[in-house]
Image (cartoon, grey):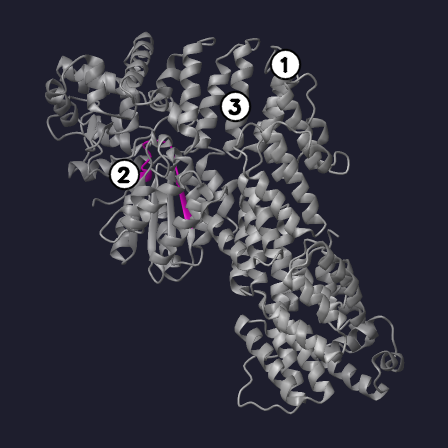
């Protein structure tokens, strides 16, 4: 490989990224530059260096037409080489997830992460501005998920503010360092050096003067040196080949000009920005030596786009494919086209743009129209024809609108982001007072919602219905109701449903019923579901009311009844306004778990985590984390909670984050990590109460009586609070085994027989933490009664279970009881090493003393509160001073107040 001229600093920064990756620090490098400045040459140099250093290299180049096929941009990097990042079997499985981008991205990240364990790697995506949406999203997830690997991500792109690459950078900069490398035009000296390298000698003065006009572009310099601006080259003289210098752009990476608002799919066949002086003339000179058939082939191909099929061009030219073989060979030998096997493409987008500039606009329009007609007639689909339809469509062209609507529907299942751009263009082609505009507007709202662009869909819908410049036609009651019903399901899931949006006087009866049903879902007190069920005749409306009844029953703790409502609601076939099935099943599974079906619910939730509606991912994640916690799977619950928080940040919707923080805080407390729990609590009163209990505040136990119905592991907390009346209410609402056993455990008091029966009942549940809590109570009671054998055996069973689960905090408390009872073991595995300093170093009694002193107690009053002697309090206080490194009560009080200060957002 010839030296890379003028880019030593940029290459050095990439090499630093490789060294950091080898040392274990993953990062993302973004190379940005205009066409022809040598982005791909710089990438190639980095790849060569990485391979020399033993890196696994995975390389892909995005294509301008990638928007039509999901994951097409990234797939070559995943599948290249003898030992690809993802093997064939697993890659084929990914096809089933094309409609679930979140699950697919997570699966890709998981597979690649396993492959790269212990392996240093460079993963490259060139021409990233053309990435299909699914590849771009998968890349965002992968960079964040694999931040702990020996990995450098390298992305090369054209400048596109707010485009694909900017979105990736903004999404991952908190997880990995980002190296922005912007390529400026090469210096005159670097351009001269390229010429010397290619000519193997000095540069003649005439050529040197011409090189001064290439505007620092290594690509244009290469072409000039190869004779592009001079004489037509002979065979093999085309520029940008495998041995070219700074302008070598890889051949396999078509690019295109601007058009960011239109999108890559819609830019096919359109020219790039302003061309360098002389480039068009140079292409004319190069083409002048071609036969008429070859020139026609090249010009026709330029209208098709950067990538095309020979058979399509042949059909348009009404020539047999075999007859064009010679013409194609001429174009390839002239350095204009490249045969990539399955398709043909221009050697560089600048060459296509220069060729296209020589095709009169009227001819371009005629060719675009003919291409669109041909592609549709050949059964290639409206999505493939869409770019050409857009190139010739005029406002009011109903045929073009119809084609684009069909294209949007073809793309919707797998490429919803692209579908959103297509349907928006269809809408723009209709007149502001054309009734068809309203019909297409409904499509726009539906597609935007499917593409998870709620804010854009809501703003569009409001404009459409409010008589703005967007639409001047009649807003019928049915139009208003239809759009409101399109929005309502997602608004409900996202907690954004507003009562005023649920009216459309004069709409069709079935639409009116559905809007009324949503009002019952939003405000069950105002519109009682029970009163509506008997009156609803529309199946969708009835399903919504059933869901409302389920939500009400669940909030009241009537889990069995709520489960049945959700099940019945899910039996209705989907239609306009239908609630997302996955969201209904989330409610059902939560209720099943609370109604003695925990393990079945957990199994189903695991299935939904890779097969459910990805737009309900946040609700699914909260459910799954809760069920894993209830089943005692602390590691799985923690992992799921953190994954869910990452997804919420990804979609900028943290409304359900408190539920995740509750799960994480409970796990931290079970593991004896109160500081970590405190970092997660925010203004959550229940978690703050649990922390107070962990810190020795017995009075805080009473506050657990106010634990909300939906708090994770509420029954366990009510047992700890001895809330017999609340447990009785729970039994009355939903008499599950867990609720019955928990109520009896608290109601038994010191009655050993009842305690034994309650403990035995709870042993039949699938909740190991609750079982251990019961055995702890029963074992302590037996010890206090004098039955050492039963008490020790029961407590040891609880200790073993908690130790296995990793719940070291309750395990340590049980161990302390056993040790006080004289039980001896060669090794006590459950007790975590106590910190030597800081709050975690304090014993429970020392924490209680610290809290009392901070409240203003003297040693004597604190002793009375704790029922110990004042000298004992003094001993504990001196130990507190030492561990917290304070010298006075004032300092201690300040430290405690800082620790227990309300959250700034409380």
Work out whether residue 259 can be spotted: no
Q: Residues within 10 Å of mark 3 (few under 14, many from 20)?
A: many
Q: Quadrant of residue 596?
A: bottom right
Mark 3 vs 1, N-terminal side = 3
Q: Is residue 822 above or below residue 159?
A: below
Residue contact at pointers 3 and 1, CB within 8 angstroms: no
Q: Quadrant of residue 34?
A: top left
At 72% from the left and 50% from the top, the residue drawn is 556
Q: Name the residue that disc number 1 marks.
A: 476
User: Could you tell whether 385 is left or right of 25 in the image?
Assistant: left
Mark 2 vs 1, N-terminal side = 2
Q: Name the residue that disc number 3 marks.
A: 444
At 64% from the left and 88% from the top, the residue drawn is 819
Secondary element under disc 1, as helix, strand or loop, is: loop
User: Where residue 640 appears, x then y in whole percent?
Assistant: 53, 56
User: Where residue 418 appears, x then y in whole percent?
Assistant: 43, 29
* Viewer-nearest of discs 3 and 2: 3
Work out whether residue 864 can be spotted: yes
Range of magenta residues: 28-40
At 35% from the left and 63% from the top, the residue drawn is 118
In this rendered view, identify the residue nearer to me: 734 or 440.
734
Q: Which mark is residue 246?
A: 2
């Amino acid at each position: 490989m010839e030296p890379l001229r003028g880019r030593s600093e940029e290459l050095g920064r990439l090499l630093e990224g490789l060294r950091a990756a080898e040392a274990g620090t993953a990062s993302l490098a973004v190379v940005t530059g205009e066409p022809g400045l040598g982005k791909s040459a710089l990438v190639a140099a980095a790849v060569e260096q990485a391979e020399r250093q033993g890196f696994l290299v995975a390389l892909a180049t995005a294509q301008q037409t990638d928007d039509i096929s999901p994951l097409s941009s990234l797939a070559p990097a995943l599948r290249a080489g003898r030992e690809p990042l993802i093997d064939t079997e697993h890659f084929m499985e990914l096809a089933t997830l094309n409609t679930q981008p979140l699950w697919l991205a997570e699966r890709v990240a998981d597979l690649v992460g396993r492959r790269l364990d212990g392996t240093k790697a460079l993963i490259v995506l060139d021409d990233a501005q053309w990435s299909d949406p699914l590849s771009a999203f998968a890349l965002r997830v992968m960079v964040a998920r694999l931040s702990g690997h020996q990995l450098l991500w390298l992305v090369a792109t054209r400048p596109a503010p707010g485009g694909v690459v900017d979105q990736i950078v903004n999404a991952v900069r908190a997880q990995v360092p980002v190296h922005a490398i912007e390529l400026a035009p090469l210096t005159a000296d670097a351009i001269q050096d390229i010429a010397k390298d290619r000519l193997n000698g000095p540069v003649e003065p005439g050529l040197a003067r011409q090189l001064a006009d290439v505007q620092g572009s290594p690509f244009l310099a290469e072409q000039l040196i190869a004779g592009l601006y001079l004489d037509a080259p002979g065979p093999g003289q085309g520029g940008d080949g495998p041995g070219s210098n700074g302008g070598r752009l890889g051949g396999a990476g078509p690019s295109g000009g601007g058009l960011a608002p239109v999108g890559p799919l819609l830019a096919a066949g359109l020219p790039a920005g302003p061309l360098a002086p002389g480039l068009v003339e140079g292409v004319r000179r190069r083409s002048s030596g071609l036969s008429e058939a070859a020139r026609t082939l090249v010009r026709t191909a330029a209208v098709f786009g950067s990538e095309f099929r020979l058979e399509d061009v042949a059909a348009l030219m009404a020539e047999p494919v075999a007859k064009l073989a010679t013409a194609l060979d001429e174009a390839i030998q002239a350095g204009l086209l490249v045969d990539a096997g399955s398709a043909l493409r221009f050697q560089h987008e600048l060459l296509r743009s220069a060729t296209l500039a020589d095709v009169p606009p009227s001819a371009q329009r005629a060719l675009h129209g003919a291409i669109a007609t041909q592609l549709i007639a050949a059964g290639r689909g409206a999505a493939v024809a869409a770019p050409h339809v857009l190139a010739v469509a005029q406002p009011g062209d109903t045929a073009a609108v119809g084609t684009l609507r069909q294209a949007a529907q073809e793309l919707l299942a797998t490429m919803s982001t692209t579908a959103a751009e297509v349907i928006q263009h269809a809408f723009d082609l209709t007149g502001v007072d054309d009734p068809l505009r309203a019909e297409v507007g409904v499509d726009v709202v539906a597609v935007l919602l499917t593409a998870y662009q709620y804010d854009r869909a809501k703003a569009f819908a409001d404009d459409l219905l409010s008589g703005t410049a967007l639409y001047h036609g009649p807003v019928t009651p049915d139009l208003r109701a239809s759009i409101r019903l399109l929005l309502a399901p997602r608004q409900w899931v996202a907690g954004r449903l507003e009562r005023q949006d649920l009216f459309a006087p004069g709409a069709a009866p079935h639409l009116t019923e559905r809007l009324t049903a949503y009002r019952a879902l939003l405000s069950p007190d105002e519109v009682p579901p029970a009163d509506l069920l008997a009156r609803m005749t529309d199946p969708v409306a009835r399903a919504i009311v059933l869901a409302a009844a389920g939500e009400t029953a669940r909030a009241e703790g009537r889990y069995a009844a709520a489960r049945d409502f959700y099940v019945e609601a899910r039996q209705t076939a989907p239609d306009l306004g239908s609630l997302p099935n996955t969201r209904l099943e989330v409610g059902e599974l939560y209720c099943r778990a609370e109604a003695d079906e925990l393990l079945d619910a957990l199994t189903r939730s695991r299935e939904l985590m890779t097969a459910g509606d990805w737009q309900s991912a946040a609700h699914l994640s909260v459910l799954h984390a809760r069920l894993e916690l209830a089943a005692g799977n602390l590691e799985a619950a923690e992992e799921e909670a953190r994954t869910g928080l990452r997804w919420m940040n990804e979609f900028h919707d943290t409304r359900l984050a408190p539920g995740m923080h509750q799960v994480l805080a409970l796990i931290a407390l079970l593991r004896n990590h109160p500081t970590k729990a405190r970092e997660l609590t925010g203004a959550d009163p229940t978690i703050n109460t649990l922390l107070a209990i962990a810190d020795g505040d017995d009075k805080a136990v009473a506050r657990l009586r106010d634990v909300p119905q939906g708090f994770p592991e509420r029954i366990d907390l009510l047992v700890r609070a001895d809330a017999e009346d609340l447990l009785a209410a729970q039994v009355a609402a939903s008499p599950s085994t867990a609720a019955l056993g928990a109520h009896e455990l608290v109601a038994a008091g010191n009655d050993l027989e009842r305690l034994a029966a309650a403990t035995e009942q709870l042993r039949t549940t699938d909740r190991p933490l609750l079982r251990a809590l019961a055995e702890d109570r029963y074992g302590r009671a037996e010890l206090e009664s004098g039955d050492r054998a039963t008490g020790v055996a029961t407590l040891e069973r609880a200790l073993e279970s908690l130790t296995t689960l990793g719940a070291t905090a309750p395990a340590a408390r049980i161990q302390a009881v056993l040790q006080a009872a004289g039980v001896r073991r060669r090794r006590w595995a459950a007790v975590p090493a106590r910190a030597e300093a800081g709050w975690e170093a304090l014993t429970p009694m020392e924490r209680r003393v610290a809290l009392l002193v901070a409240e203003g107690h003297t040693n004597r009053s604190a002793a009375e509160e704790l029922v110990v002697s004042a000298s004992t309090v003094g001993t504990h206080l001196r130990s507190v001073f030492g561990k917290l490194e304070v010298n006075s009560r004032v300092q201690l009080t300040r430290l405690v107040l800082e620790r227990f200060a309300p959250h700034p957002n409380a």
